[in-house]
Image: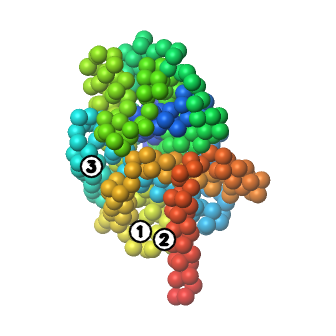
Amino acid sequence: MPSEHPHTENNVPFIDAILPGLGGLLAGGVFLLPAMAVDAVGPAALISLLLAAALALGLARLAVSPDRSGAPFSSFVPWWMGAVARIAAASALAGVLSAYLLPRGTDATHSVVAGAALLLAGAAVMLGVASSPSAVSIATGAAVVGIGFYVGLAAPLATRSGFVPFAPHGWAAVLPGAGLLFFLFGGLEYPLCLSGVIVRPRQSIPRAALLGAALMAVIALIVTAVSVGVGGSAFTTHRLFARSVDHAPLLSIAAATGQPIALWGLSVGASVCCAVAIHRLLSEAAESIASLARLGQLPRALGVASGSGDAPWAAALAASAIAIGASRVASLEGLIEFASGAVLVSYLARLASRGWAWLAGAIVLMLALMPPSAWRSVGAAAILGVACYAARGLWKTAS
């Protein structure tokens, strides 16, 4: 569910929606996902990325369209899965932030920094500090500048030999790789937060979503191609949990350029981008949980807001606590795979609510794209949500 901002004047031109539209997608995943995808697929991850981008572009208009199914349960599933995906994504990005902020830190230091980032972001949400489009635009600008330095300095070092072999794990790995990379497009609906300020929102918001997805695809393709061309088979996260430096794989490639500005640009850009994204993700998760609680689909206690009625502090507290706990017990790779699968289910559930033919198509896509290791955790999250929904319904019936 997108963030809601109480604006009253529609005076922002479409061009000013481009950075926030891209910012909803450029949430830090681009600093880690390319290496994870190359680890799972090989250089053929470029094809996986194209497939993920094609799906994102196909779902972009659906993502910014209101739910018209009229069925409470069909609305509950995408909202619930979207909320848990955001919590997992925030937890994962806290790990990415700590790795890029302190590339020479120990695992213990990274754990403390990640927990502190989640704690501060959760406290800000509980206090009603909104994730404004301006902050997202600034973070996006910082990330784009950092990536620009990285690509500009590393591209001359790329060679064709880095792309051989192109598909070492077989072509069957390409589709699950696309499902993993769909994490990059998890914020397709973020332009909805501009509905109160942008000129001609009905036309501009879908365009902002489409343009954001296209720009995200281009950025990710360039970063992946340059990184593979320079690092070859070494540009992976196969030692992701053995050494902390592997949490920040782009820094290893940037170091090869011999230019400190590439390292500094990446570190600052990734840290700022991830920090703003963590706050935004927890805010959106809290709003979704609180909305479901107010609709009677989750316990009413989760819908409690501050005295002003703006900050869903109970839902924010729950989301932050879960995110911090997940960062302590789950692996970074597992969190990202879970978030990728959950956000995929969220969008496909909205697609399935349009009719039986759409439902069949959504099931086929889910079977083809869901990362194999994410099936159990995503299924458990879905079952938990359905159980909460059913228990709440039985409670209302009994009372």
Q: Which residue is disc 2 drawn over?
A: 298
Tell me if label 2 and label 1 are in contact, CB under 8 Å.
yes
Q: What is the C-alpha distance between the residues marked 2 and 1?
A: 9 Å
Q: Which residue type carries mark 2?
A: Leu
Task: Please provide percent x and percent y for residue 71.
Answer: 65, 66
Circle 3 residue: 111
Secondary structure of the residue carrying numbered label 3: helix
Question: Along the polypeptide, which appears first: circle 2 or circle 3?
Answer: 3
Q: Residues within 10 Å of mark 3 (few under 14, many from 20)?
A: some
Task: Measure the C-alpha gap from mark 2 to mark 3.
Answer: 31 Å
Quarter where residue 258 is shown: top left
The local secondary structure at tag 1 comes to: helix
- The picture places residue 353, in percent across and down from the top left corner, at 68, 57
Residue 303 has which mark?
1
Residue drawn at (45%, 63%) of the image? 289
* Residue 113 in the image, given as x and y percentages of width and height: 24, 47
Instruction: Give the left or right position of residue 139, taking residue 48 as reference.
Output: left
Kind of residue indicated by mark 3: Ser
> The residue tagged with tag 2: helix, strand or loop?
loop
Residue furthest bottom in the image: 399
Number of residues whose C-alpha sits closer than 10 Å to that of mark 1, classed few (under 14), some (14–19) or many (20 or more): many
- Looking at the image, which residue sits at the far right? 357
